[in-house]
Amino acid sequence: MVNETEKANVNEKTEELRKKFFIDAGIYEEQLLEGHIDKTMEHAQLTSDGRIVFNNELLTDRQKVGIVILCRCLGSKLDDKIEESVTNKEISELTGIEPKSARARLSNLIDENVIIRVSRGVHRINYNKIDDFIDSITE
């Protein structure tokens, strides 16, 4: 038979394990966001009005399209005035890429599951692919 002291020790050990294993969801989200921002800033940054400033002149058109959508996603997490989704027209304007070429690069990113089509002509980043996308640019 288990005595009260043994039960207390088991409960204490379980609590120690719980504290080690579980993390606060809010803190986790902030750490994830910070990591994504740090990696993205090597390539581009977002102005307070939602425009993109490219820091990496070697980006391909495909990468620029993805970075624009990623920057808007990250910016929307920091400022409610910044819209997360991006239209085809905005992508072309923000990247300086001709609309037809921008749509072709966008189509590639959709096929790769990096970008999700929200509605006709409106897109957002696939949250599950952010790290893979950023890492593919940094390689």
Image (spheres, helix red, strand yellow):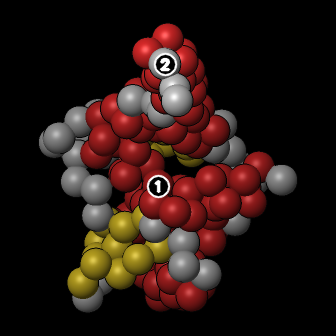
- Spot the residue most to the left: 81
The residue beneath circle 1 is 70
- Residue under the image location 46 percent in, 60 percent down: 127
Residue at left offset 63%, top offset 38%: 39
Q: In the shown orientation, is residue 3 left or right of residue 59?
A: left
Query: What amino acid is labelled 2 in the image?
Result: Asn
Indicate the quadrant where residue 40 lies: top right
Q: Badge 2: few (under 14), some or many (20 or more) residues near its Cα, within 10 Å?
A: few
44 left or right, relative to 74:
right
Between residue 10 and residue 124, name the one nearer to us: 10
Residue 86: give x, y in percent of width and height.
31, 66
- Counting residues from the start of the chain, the first of labels 1 and 2 encountered is 2
- Write the residue at 37% across / 67% down: 124
Q: Is residue 2 above or below residue 49?
A: above
Residue at figure coordinates x 54%, y 72% from the top left: 114
Q: Nearer the viewer, residue 120 or 17?
A: 17
Q: Position of residue 118 (x, y in %)?
A: 28, 78
Q: Which residue is mark 2?
A: 3
Q: Quarter of the image holding residue 30?
A: top left
Residue 98 visible in image: no
Tell me residue 42's x, y (percent): 66, 37
Q: Residue furthest front?
A: 1
